[in-house]
Amino acid sequence: MTSLSDRLKALGVQLGAKNLRLAPPRAEYPIELVVGGSTQPTDFGEAFLVERFIPVEELHGSNPLCFPANMDKLAHWAADSRVALLSPEHFLFLDTESTGLWGSGTLAFLIGLGRFELGGFRQRQYFLREPIEERAMLEALNNLVAPDDALVTFNGKSFDLPLLQGRYLTNGVMQPFRGLSHLDLLHLARRLWKDLLPSRALGNLEVQLLGIRRSQEDIPGWMIPQMYIDYLHTGDARPLAGVFYHNSMDVLSMASLLNYLAARLAAPLEAGAAHHSELFAIGRLYVDLGFAEDAIQIFQSTLSMDLPKDVQYRLVESLGLLFRRRGDYEAALQLWEQAAAEGQVYAHVEIAKYYEHRARDYAIALRYTRTAIEVIEASAIPGYERVYWQPLLEHRLARLERKLAHRGA
Amino acid sequence: MDSISKLLAHWRAEPTVGGNVAFWHQEPARPAAFTPLSQNIHPGLAAAFAKLGYSQLYSHQAQAWDLLQSGLNIAVVTGTASGKTLCYNLPVLDRLLRDKQARALYLFPTKALAYDQRNELETWLGAIDAARDVPVATYDGDTPTHHRSHIRKQARLLITNPDMLHYSILPNHTQWAEFFGNLRYIVIDEMHSYRGVFGSHVANVVRRLSRLLKFYGAKPQFVMASATIANPQELAERLVEQPVTVIDRDGAPRGARHFAIYNPPIVDSDLGLRASLIQESVRLVSDLLAYDVQTILFGRTRRMVEVMLKTLREGTKDSAERVRGYRGGYLVSERRAIEAGLRSGELRAVVATNALELGVDIGGMGATVLAGYPGSIAATWQQAGRSGRGADSSVALFVASSNPLDQFLARHPDYLMGRTPEHALINPDNLLILLSHLRCAAFELPFSRGENFGSINGERVLEFLNVLAESNELHVSGDKYFWMAEGQPSRAVSLRGVGSDSVVIQAETDEGWQLVGEVDRFGAMWLVHPDAIYIHDGATYFVEKLDLDEHVAYLRPIEGDYYTVPKSRSTVSLIAENNNDPVRGGTKHFGEVNITQEIIGYDKIQWSGMEKPGGGELDLPPMELNTFGYWLSLNETTVDDLRERGLWTNDPNEYGPNWNTIRDLVRARDQYTCQVCGLPENGRPHDVHHKIPFRTFTSLKEANQLDNLIALCRNCHRRAETIVRIRSGLAGLSFVLQHLAPLYLMCDPRDLGVFSDPKSDLADGAPVVMVFDQMGDAMGFSQRLFEIHDELMRSAYELVRECGCQDGCPSCVGPGGEQGQGSKRETLALLEALIANPELETTR
């Protein structure tokens, strides 16, 4: 009787990964000899852990690792008041390395954690020496997460958390994350630097904002799954040193980034030479969070910078809107007049609205409406804008003419 | 008397119709069997039941309700339009309304069918007050990504297809944990479509699903619904690997049903030529239209559908609104409009391919006309089953073509009536299919040592796991096997074999370029090759250009007097022979082969059916299939022996030394004009045809008597040859293997290809019969046939010997032409030479 393997081969089955170099031979080299570490007993076996303490005076990049002085704005952004009240040691920084990008068979083989402590920052890295240790690792993590902790991640809402929750589910262990506060810094980074930075990847933020340089040891993220798979097949843990380094840097940079972001949000104008695009983004975030006065301040000082025309227009428009909301029509009109003179259709409309509904001077309102129509007919504004404004203006024009005629009669 | 009965009476009396009816069967009307709605049903659902105009259930629906309440799995196999959907919708909705946590999963083989059922469900939900508690969602490839997470959380009734389950849902099951943990019903509709390789894949997807459900602690009931097949219970139980109770007593009312076989009259008694299948079918449909009977006319090919549509419209007023075509290649929106037109009754006739056969909701028709045998008994009854609307009478007509199979059925209607429909076969344990799904399952949840996979026991599973671990796809850790290779195993497994990219068909009209349709690459070469006439919904277009790189065919409308028929050439060549072994009578082989089909040119055919000069050659890339084949080559002794006994009919005809002279003589006598259609020669000499086949003569002189010879154009010659076709033993053997092999492999006949060649390059010019895997990638079928060669030949021998027919029928070696010969004797003699000791075996 031929073996199953031979029968499958006779059928032309491709076994193993495609285009694969020959399977590397086993060359046992345990992880303990590579990264040190120790085992931690749990009810479900041993979990393997690498621990490190970074004293407060040690620099990460160009700054020391420290917890933000002011978390108020971040708490508002996260719409979670707990964030402002928790003490630093309740913030748990988390980043995972996995065997793939998605799917319920993807394992989190390395979970990097960090927490501020008295005098420094404590890092823990849980690692699966073998997949079978997963349950113990999850159990150890469970013991580490308190119900009043807050998570800090970078893209954790879409990646790390669902991945870990899936692992807890698959292992039949209760997950510790339910109901925790969660700050996903990627979302805020996107919001602030979408126009400023070509990439909001953590690695790029390190270089552009945090003054961090990674060493040669670092492994690009896309290579990591295969390195772990190779480790399991060969038993050689040596190449994984770079993966531990990568994960450790990710966690530390998150802590730096949190501090940086909190500082930017707390006092955006203090830092000095901030970029107008970042300031504008923070101003708009303030508006959304309900800090109109702070936003006005930011917009006003941004306006005093040397700005490209289109940025200036958008700023003026936002600022005018804030004045109007505050009921400060004098200040608003001043901005709108200036914008109208530069051919901004919306400004004409705002002025017309003001004179129609507030000042009830229909003649002036009519005049601004007419010039607006002239602007959209004459100037080279984009077609979709013309399509948007035309009916609104025609409508307003007709109404104003009716009102004037009525008043005249 | 209703209009159908009037027309039938008229037809019976009319010699040009009644005289050609070879068979007429009437099934009397059957009253409905009603059962009151269960008292235990949710009051909201009972109210909706009344609101939608129902008062009672048909007995099979009530039976489904009862069996499901008692916790059993069921398969409902009742007629078309018998209300199968209610058999599952009622209990499922009831459960979802009662139990706020409960979930249900509906699987349909295609998106279109899912769409139909979604509409049906919406009708019910619209009538239920608490419907908001039962969010229904469709989850398929078209579902936008940003809706998906919402659906995962909210949906309580999920409609999807097996492919989506395989690619997306199972590999991400942790995101569906809530759904799986509360799953109470799994509905598998159109179960009959899960056969062959596709069905074997789906059975493994169900194994994976069941494995995860066990993990989440759910044990839902299965509800299946199917068109008529011979083995519903077997298929259902193989698919879900649980006991299933079949419900097949149909309680829906049925009007009287007529089934008739119409054989077009002989128009040339000398040659035995019959009137055109197309013309006759269209004539019958015109009668039906005149009596205002809603009709579907089924054609076998897309081209035939368009030709019949055009012909039918020419004789019908307001034809564009009342008569439509329906086939693959029509746009989805167009198809939906046609289905709606059929339901509302606005459309009176549709000419369709079997695209309309499967499940699509169009209501019942007054009549169906089958222009030619659809190829299987199941398909015949599915198409015929489209007629029949509640208690009204209906008729299904099968119009026979001159093809030997059709003519056999016209002569032996009992064959069609008495036979059970085909078996739907699957083999979920096929090594390769099983291996693929074990990979997927290992990704979804690591395997524990000793764990079963469906009905595959732990020991056997372990063998597979060890093979995968050896090749570093799995990693053994503790007592578990983890998927440990980069990438998603399900991404590498297609449930339906190789996909093919589509070609967009565009026509330049007064309003610019318009999208006319879409066909797959293979179909494009047949239908829209350069210079082809493409017919869409009766309108004709000329193909200017076929750009296969850009996937576009460029057309312009044309009013022509002809259409085109492509000519193809198939070749089979050897890539590598993996194994061979001498067997009695020859050698058996197994290896990798290349099957190439090329469109090499086209003929122009006038609408009247006459050939038109001016066809052309084409230079299109060949369509290639690299696959595995099993073949048998005959040795010289075997062939010589058969030849000596006069049982070898594969040698080419030798018409004699002065054949050229005789041929010219006949052409001159017949004034260089085709003696059937009257077409004069045009550059190409007409053929000269033996009225009584040459092979049947022993003397050259007798055969070549002038009064046995006639000049025919190529087209008419082809038709005349069909009628006097003589099968060879080799062709007979390949016919037997074609329907015997699937039984051994438990695959669908369409998963295999068969071919024979009396002088094959595969075996240095020896005669060869080959069976090959049709699915591109090796399924292991050929290897298996190679292994069981002796058994296969013995079964073939017994099958042919024991068949009660005279000289070949569709169940054994295939029928000969109407005036030709089957090959029972030749095939039997050949098989005797191939099996060890036939005489000894007969006593077994």
Image: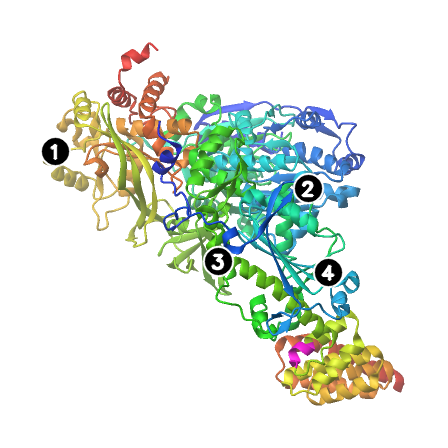
- Secondary structure under the numbered disc 2 in the rendered image: helix
- Marks 4 and 2, how far apart at CA: 54 Å
Q: Are marks 4 and 1 in contact (CB under 8 Å)?
A: no
Q: Amino acid at mark 1?
A: Gly
The magenta-colored residue range is: A274-280
| Furthest-top residue in this view | B843
Q: Which residue is mark 2?
A: B121
Q: Circle 2: is it few (<14), some (14-19), or many (20+) Cα within 10 Å?
A: some
Whichever of callouts 3 and 4 sits on the residue coming sooner in the sequence is: 4
User: What distance separates the C-alpha of mark 1 from that of mark 2?
Assistant: 72 Å
Q: Chain of mark 4?
A: A
Query: Could you say where residue A196 lies in the image, as x and y percent from the top left?
Result: 61, 75
Give the Cα distance between marks 3 and 2.
48 Å
The answer to whether B68 is drawn above or below residue B164 in the figure is: above
> Mostly what secondary structure, the magenta segment?
helix
Which label number is shown at residue A89? 4
Q: Classify mark 3: helix, strand or loop.
A: helix
Which of the labelled discs sits on residue A223, or is there none?
3
Does mark 1 fall on the same chain as mark 3? no
Q: Nearer the viewer, residue A59 or B121?
A: A59
Placement of the C terminus of chain B among the 4 image quadrants: top left
Q: Which residue is mark 1?
A: B656
User: Identity of the amino acid at label 2?
Assistant: Leu
Measure the alpha-carbon separation of dots 4 and 1: 105 Å
Closer to the eye: label 4 or 1: 4
Q: Which one is earlier in the sequence, the residue at label 1 or at label 2?
A: 2
**x and y, in percent, of residue B547 in the image:** 38, 59
Task: Please identify, in this view, whether the residue under mark 3 or under mark 1 is nearer the observer.
Answer: 3
